[in-house]
Amino acid sequence: MSDAAEIINMVQDAEGRFTPQSVERMERRTKGLVPKLLRVAGKIPFADDLAAAYFAARDPSTPLKAKGVLFAAGAYFVMPVDLLPDFLAGLGFTDDATVLATALGIVGM
């Protein structure tokens, strides 16, 4: 953590860990990810990647920058307003898949 603003904006989570406020906020936004994922798992081919990204972001050993990227991708999946609405047949989850693939690519670097 070399960024001073990142150090100043640290908050203590429920488990006593200190995380940047932005990561903690994204983690709160992804609370609805698991129920939505269970509802649509049979309709999207990237459900296993999304679940893996969510649990990797929740792992304490994952670096904070990777957590931020993964939680942001999960929050985009859960948000009701996105580039292509999820109810559009065939196209609804393509933007979600693109965001997840990009996030996994960034974290993989």
Image (tube, rainbow, N blue to C red):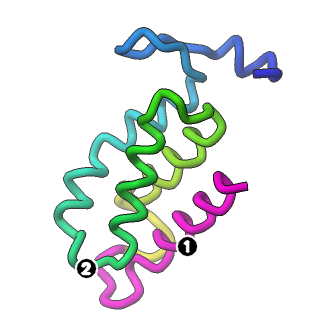
Between 46 and 83, the one lying in front of the other is 46
Which residue is tagged 1? 98
- Point out residue 79 in the picture as x, y percentages from the top left corner: 39, 55
**Which quadrant of the figure has residue 68?**
top right
- Which amino acid, mark 1? Thr
Secondary structure category for the residue under label 2: loop
Dot 1 crowding, Cα within 10 Å, few <14, some 14–19, many 20+? few
Query: What residue is rendered at 81% in x and 23% in y?
Result: 3
Query: What residue is rendered at 40% in x and 48% in y?
Result: 54
Secondary structure category for the residue under label 1: helix
Q: Magenta span covers which residues?
A: 86-109
Does the CB distance between marks 1 and 2 fall below 8 Å?
no
Between 51 and 76, the one lying in front of the other is 51
- Which amino acid, mark 2? Lys
- Toward the bottom, the furthest residue is 90
Which residue is tagged 2? 43
Between 12 and 66, the one lying in front of the other is 66
- Point out residue 42 in the picture as x, y percentages from the top left corner: 21, 76
Dot 2 crowding, Cα within 10 Å, few <14, some 14–19, many 20+? few
